[in-house]
Amino acid sequence: MKKQAWQTALADLITDPQELWQLLDLDKELLAGAIEATKQFPLKAPRNFVTRMQKGNAQDPLLLQVLPHGLELNQVPGYSNDPLAEIDVNPVPGLLHKYQGRVLVTLTSACAVHCRYCFRRHFPYTDNNPGSRGWEKIMAYIEADTSISEVILSGGDPLTVNDRVLHAFSAALANISHLKRLRIHSRLPVVLPERITDEFVGWLRALQLETVIVIHANHPNEINDAVRSAILKLRHADIMLLNQSVLLKSVNDNVAVLKELSESLFAIGVLPYYLHVLDKVDGAAHFDISRDRAKQLAEELRKQLPGYLVPRLVCEEAGAESKHDV
Ligand SMILES: *Cc1c(COP(=O)(O)O)cnc(C)c1O
Ligand code: SF4
């Protein structure tokens, strides 16, 4: 079958540090460390996303999110490979059941972008990829537990799979009568907005479940015209749209930036949901800011914005029954 434009874009990510350095005219001194860092967690950045970065600026807030850095190789006390102990809440491959009433399903380990701060950067996805045969077990698990009312498709990025797989998955879900909602956590509407095709929107419209899409933007510069039109298409399909962000040093640890992010999201019809503090995953320590500083930022946001534009500042703790306010 002919590839769709989004699939071509997904197959044509920037993965070679040298190419990123050339495109953005970056300081060669950082290249050797970057190449080392990609051995642990490869570079992946969609071309359209990279066009939103400023040339020659190694501190660009979008670049920092995807830029492999020698600092990632430092071992820092308090950081680990699986900070949320997700391996313990993984009853069947591809399914995490951590909180009451909702389960998280990973259809794929692939993402269109590799966010250097990602808490799943070391997750053993290759052992945890359900494949379509594994779906039977997932469906059986959900079917057997009538307390589950929501299925969350999460990362990897569920929208990197093709529409045929999404159709098959939702068709299997449709047989489970106690399900009310399907939630999709995806960075694609932001980093690869080409993904939001008419066919995809058609699938959403036809779903028999209430549908929520939680996008992931950390900085207002991420929202360009392509993102705006992708979101508009989703809104026309009556999809509830929320955003989650991660609080990241030098990217968005700043009241003006967070405020502008909320306002830019609202302008395209997306409400802020969570602002996560960084999970202490190996390789991400250079993004950390103190809890006190995080609380200060949240407090300042509450002063400057209407309540509905203030995301909840939350952290995750292994074994906890929900995400916690910080
Ligand atoms: C974050 C998360 C959820 C969703 O939590 P909400 O507070 O409902 O957004 C569900 N399952 C897992 C495993 C999660 O990490
Ligand atoms: S898109 Fe999400 S799951 Fe994928 S690397 Fe980024 S934060 Fe992690």
Image (cartoon, rainbow, N blue to C red):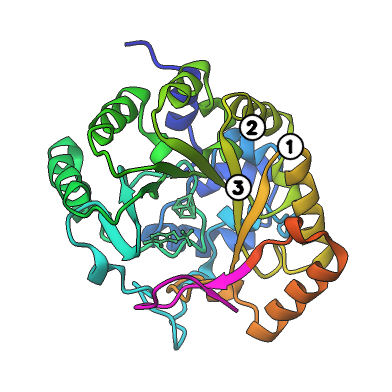
The reply to whether dot 2 and dot 1 touch (C-beta < 8 Å) is yes
Q: Which numbered tag is attached to residue 268?
A: 1
Residue 318 lies in the magenta stretch: yes
Q: Residue at x 51, y 60 (%)?
A: 116
For the C terminus, give its image quadrant: bottom right
84, above or below 246, in the image: below
Number of the label disc, if any, that sits on residue 242: 3
- Foreground of the two, 50 or 305: 305
Horizontal side of residue 325 vs 88, given as left or right:
right
Nearest to N terminus: mark 2 or mark 3: 2
Q: Are marks 3 and 1 in contact (CB under 8 Å)?
A: no
Sequence-wise first label, 3 or 1 = 3
Of all residues, the one furthest to the bottom in this rendering is 77
The answer to whether 181 appears left or right of 224 in the picture is left
Q: Amino acid at mark 2?
A: Ile
Q: In this rendering, is residue 227 above or below 311?
A: above
The picture quadrant where one finds residue 313 is bottom right
The amino acid beneath tag 3 is: Leu
What's the CA distance linking mark 2 and mark 1? 7 Å
Q: Neighbour class for label 1 at 10 Å: few (<14), some, many (≥20)? A: some
Give the camera-side residue of 14 and 48: 48
For image coordinates 24% across by 52% down, the residue present is: 146
Secondary element under disc 2, as helix, strand or loop, is helix
**Residue 136 percent across, percent down from the top left:** 13, 41
Task: Identify the magenta region.
Answer: 313-326
Relative image position of residue 50 (x, y in whole percent): 64, 40
Q: Is residue 162 above or below residue 296?
A: above
